[in-house]
């Protein structure tokens, strides 16, 4: 059985770590040469599981599969925190995640529409023709993806009423911006004919509320104990932190930033558009007033946690084709963008758990700053 839970992993030598990851992910000599090249760069620091192109978080068990997680981030304590959060969750059986839906939305803005009801009726009547135009000559359709549906919306703007057509596209393993934007441009002339309006924007929406991933976990409360604090005390700190994050935007922003520490690092390592993911998560968090994207609560002997966020992440296309990203995806052994999305959201939840468990008790400065100081010392010695 392959496992990413290796006691004392961060204390091993660089060679020992690479050997474990090589065996875990069946890395070949090209992969090892690429890793070596990054180690030869002048700013390479051997700190917190940094193997060269990225740092590695351990202990992740998600939907019963083990992962070493490549994370690209300057701050080593974020990686240590992810591993610590994952270790706690592992003691409760690991993360369980699923995609609630997996589609992206493209927006076509039509101005100066005279008769909205007539235009809406025309669009609905010609829906299959519009989808046919969008799907024409698209390889993704053969694979089961492509434009699946559309919605017509009426939006009052400060410059008058707009007709907004949403094209709903299953982008499978791609992030989707390219394909969605192309489809929108291709359907525009026909939609203009149907509405007799004037086309304006044709662009993907990063509010990806049809590409939601949901991950849950549970941790035995007694396992949460740290140094001078019992598990119950740590759990109580976490619950108070969540309560404040729900009540005060000054805290919500920081709570969600801690979640994004993990998510952005995986997105960067795998060549994904982390700004799109950030935009998606924060807009989703703000859909009913800005709220935390995770929640923790007590249930019997356990502290349970949940994250629900849009996850427009890809395993094909764009910068995911770079050598470094291919290596990260190989180490992850992910088979699809859905699997990567569930894993990435789990990393965000792990980082959140690790942060809240110390914030409400001993504070972050001890652990966080210890690594940070080491990082500064090593970089100054270069
Ligand atoms: C720091 O990068 C992240 C934290 O501020 C997150 C949080 O406060 O929950 C520690």
Image: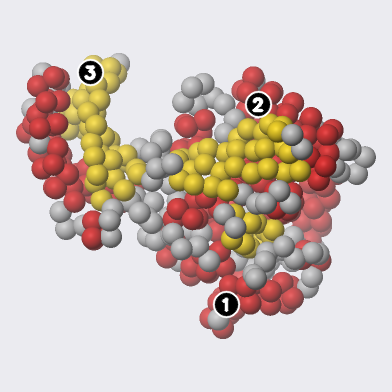
User: What element does badge 3 sit on?
Assistant: strand
Most foreground residue, 73 or 83: 83
Is 115 situated above or below 348? Answer: above
Query: Which mark's residue is nearer the viewer, 3 or 1?
Result: 1
On the rendered image, what quadrant is the C terminus found in?
Answer: bottom right
Label 1 residue SS: loop
The residue that mark 3 highlights is 161
Q: Quadrant of the N terminus?
A: bottom right
Residue with the most extreme right position: 228
Q: Position of residue 14 (x, y in %)?
A: 74, 73
How many marks overall?
Answer: 3
Which residue, given by chain and number where applicable, does mark 2 sit on? 245
Rendering quarter of residue 235: top right
Whether residue 54 is visible, yes or no, is yes
The answer to whether residue 195 is above or below residue 370 is above
Q: Give percent across and percent down for residue 289.
A: 51, 21
Q: Residue at x 54, y 24 (%)?
A: 290
Q: Position of residue 101 (x, y in %)?
A: 39, 43
Mark 3 or 2, nearer chain start = 3
Q: Quadrant of residue 162?
A: top left
Q: Is residue 156 above or below residue 150?
A: above
Q: Is residue 57 left or right of residue 230?
A: left
Residue to which mark 1 is pinned: 26
Describe the element under mark 2 as helix, strand or loop: helix
Q: Going by the image, does 120 lie left or right of 68?
A: left
- Please identify the residue farthest to the bottom as the structure is shown: 29
């Amino acid at each position: 059985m392959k496992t990413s839970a290796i006691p004392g992993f961060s204390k091993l030598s660089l060679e020992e770590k690479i050997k474990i990851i090589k065996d875990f992910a069946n890395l070949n000599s090209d992969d090892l040469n690429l890793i070596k090249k990054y180690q030869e760069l002048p700013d390479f620091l051997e700190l917190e599981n940094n193997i060269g192109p990225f740092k590695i978080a351990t202990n992740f068990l998600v939907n019963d599969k083990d992962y070493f997680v490549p994370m690209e981030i300057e701050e080593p304590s974020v990686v240590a925190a992810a591993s610590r959060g994952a270790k706690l969750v592992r003691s409760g059986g690991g993360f369980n995640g699923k995609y609630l839906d997996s589609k992206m939305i493209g927006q076509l803005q039509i101005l100066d529409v005279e008769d909205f009801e007539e235009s809406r009726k025309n669009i609905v009547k010609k829906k299959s023709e519009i989808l046919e135009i969008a799907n024409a000559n698209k390889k993704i359709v053969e694979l089961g993806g492509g434009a699946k549906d559309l919605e017509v919306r009426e939006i009052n703007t400060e410059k008058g009423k707009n007709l907004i057509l949403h094209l709903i596209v299953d982008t499978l393993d791609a992030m989707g911006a390219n394909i969605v934007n192309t489809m929108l441009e291709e359907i525009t002339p026909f939609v203009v004919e149907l509405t007799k309006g004037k086309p304006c924007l044709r662009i993907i929406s990063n509010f990806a509320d049809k590409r939601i991933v949901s991950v849950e976990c549970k941790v035995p409360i007694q396992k949460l104990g740290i140094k001078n604090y019992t598990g119950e005390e740590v759990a109580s700190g976490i619950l108070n932190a969540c309560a404040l994050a729900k009540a005060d935007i000054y805290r919500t922003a920081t709570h969600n930033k801690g979640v994004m520490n993990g998510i952005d690092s995986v997105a960067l390592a795998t060549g994904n558009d982390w700004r799109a993911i950030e935009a998606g998560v924060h807009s989703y968090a703000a859909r009913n007033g800005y709220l935390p994207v995770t929640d923790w609560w007590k249930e019997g002997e356990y502290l349970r946690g949940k994250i629900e966020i849009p996850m427009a992440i890809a395993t094909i296309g764009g910068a995911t084709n770079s050598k470094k990203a291919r290596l990260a995806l190989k180490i992850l052994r992910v088979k699809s963008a859905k699997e990567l999305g569930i894993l990435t959201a789990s990393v965000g939840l792990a980082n959140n758990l690790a942060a809240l468990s110390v914030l409400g008790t001993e504070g972050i400065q001890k652990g966080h700053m210890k690594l940070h100081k080491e990082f500064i010392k090593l970089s100054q010695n270069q």
